[in-house]
Amino acid sequence: MNRFEGSGNRIAKIRYLDGDFNVILPGTFVICAVTGREIPVEELRYWSVARQEPYIDAQAAFDADKRAGILPGQTDGGSVTP
């Protein structure tokens, strides 16, 4: 690819930081780690720095944290303790 060509309709490679992200490889979208849906880079608002994963919305981010077992009151198995 010519370095002056646009990024086209392809997946971007991104490094997720606290409150920001760096585009490593330009593209127009990333894939939500929970839903598998495309997220346009300009609409990307939710991600995990620790897991380096993007999420389509707050619910997907919550579900990812729940799956990882990092929510208050959770054990390693992802089940909530009473």
Image (cartoon, rainbow, N blue to C red):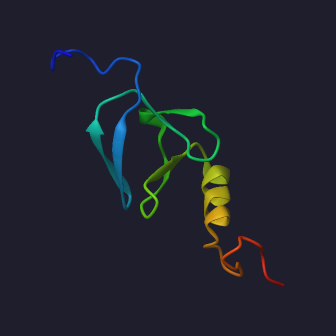
How many numbered markers are drawn? 0
Instruction: Say above or below: 14 vs 9.
Output: below
Residue at the extreme bottom: 82
Give the percent coordinates (x, y) of residue 79: 77, 73
Which residue appears at 48% of the width and 53% of the height?
Answer: 47
Instruction: Say above or below: 80 vs 67.
Output: below
Q: Which quadrant of the view contains residue 63?
A: bottom right
Could you tell whether 51 is left or right of 4 in the image? right
Which residue appears at 71% of the width and 70% of the height?
Answer: 78
Could you tell whether 78 is left or right of 45 in the image? right
Could you tell whether 18 is left or right of 59 in the image? left
Residue at the extreme front: 77
Name the one closer to the observer, 30 or 44.
30
Give the percent coordinates (x, y) of residue 40: 47, 31
- Which quadrant is home to the N terminus? top left
- Which quadrant is home to the C terminus? bottom right
Which residue appears at 55% of the width and 42% of the height?
Answer: 32
Give the percent coordinates (x, y) of residue 29: 44, 31
Could you tell whether 19 is left or right of 31 in the image? left
